[in-house]
């Protein structure tokens, strides 16, 4: 089982739609969780951190379920500019923290 | 000013050559990383340095040798390049490697080995 797993998609949705991605992780001792966004041929950039209590930033909501070992990202009212790959990142504690990326979920928002 | 800068942006070379990629961050961060993103877009950590000391080395062939002359720089030297080394290499930094802080990435180096 991969450490961090995501459905690669692509998720193809119309503008204005609500779309959700999940990410599962295998290490129950994982400490911290993030969603990054990567545009084509660009570097990943932090979208939001994920907290146990859940957190919201505008149209984006992230949730963590430690019992089932997954995190989720919900995007409401999708915009064309939301088209990108969304990367789940889990910090695993070994001797040091290792930021481990999922393969990413591709989102395409069409008019 | 670019926070994390890496050079070159593109690198095209022949099999068997030796090449280097440079990375510098001006954020005052203590921890720097090298990631490899292959053709399937999977970002895999290669190395991490904290204050010039190697802290993560993830089963990378020893043809790859990172060097950190100071905490603001982490360079990657690759010997005897192979076709399978073709990928995008990203440098990143974080505040102290403590696990809760975000990563800042450079814009990537597209390496093509012919």
Image: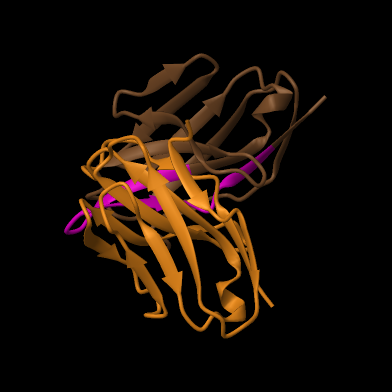
Q: Which residue is farthest top?
A: A58
Question: Could you tell me residue A95's position as x and y percent?
Answer: 16, 59
Total marks shown come to 0
Range of magenta residues: A88-107
Q: Is residue A1 left or right of residue B52?
A: right
In the rendered view of the protein, which quadrant contains the C terminus of chain B? bottom right
Q: Residue at x 83, y 24 (%)?
A: A111
On the picture, is B69 further left or further right than A44? Answer: left
Q: Colour of chain A?
A: brown
Residue name at image x 43 percent, y 52 percent: B23
Q: Provide residue A65's location: percent of width, then percent of height.
A: 34, 36
Q: Position of residue A94 (x, y in %)?
A: 20, 58
B40 or A53: nearer the viewer: B40
Towards the viewer: B16 or A31: B16
Q: Residue at x 43, y 35 (%)?
A: B3
Residue B27 placement: quadrant: top left
Instruction: Examine the rendering and report whether any part of residue A33 can be seen.
Output: yes
Query: Chain B colour?
Result: orange
Classify A100 as above or below A87.
Answer: below
Q: Is residue A106 magenta?
A: yes
């Amino acid at each position: 089982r991969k450490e961090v797993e995501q459905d690669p998609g692509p998720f193809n949705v119309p503008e204005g739609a609500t779309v959700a991605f999940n990410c599962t992780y295998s290490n129950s001792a994982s400490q911290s969780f993030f969603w990054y966004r990567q545009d084509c041929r660009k570097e990943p950039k932090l979208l939001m951190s994920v907290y146990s209590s859940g957190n919201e930033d505008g149209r984006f909501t992230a949730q963590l379920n430690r019992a089932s070992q997954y995190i989720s990202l919900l995007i409401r009212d999708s915009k064309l500019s939301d088209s990108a790959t969304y990367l789940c990142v889990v910090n695993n504690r070994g001797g040091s923290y290792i930021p481990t990326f999922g393969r990413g979920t591709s989102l395409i928002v069409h008019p | 000013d670019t926070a994390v800068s890496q050079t070159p942006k593109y690198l095209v070379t022949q099999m068997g050559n030796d090449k280097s990629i440079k990375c510098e961050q001006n954020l005052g961060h203590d921890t720097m990383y090298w990631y490899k993103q292959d053709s399937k877009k999977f970002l895999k950590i290669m190395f991490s340095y904290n204050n010039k000391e190697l802290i993560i080395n993830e089963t990378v062939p020893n043809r790859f040798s990172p060097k950190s002359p100071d905490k603001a720089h982490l360079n990657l030297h690759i010997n005897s390049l192979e076709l399978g080394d073709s990928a995008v290499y990203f440098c990143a930094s974080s505040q102290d490697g403590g696990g809760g802080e975000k990563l800042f990435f450079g814009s990537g180096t597209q390496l093509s080995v012919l």
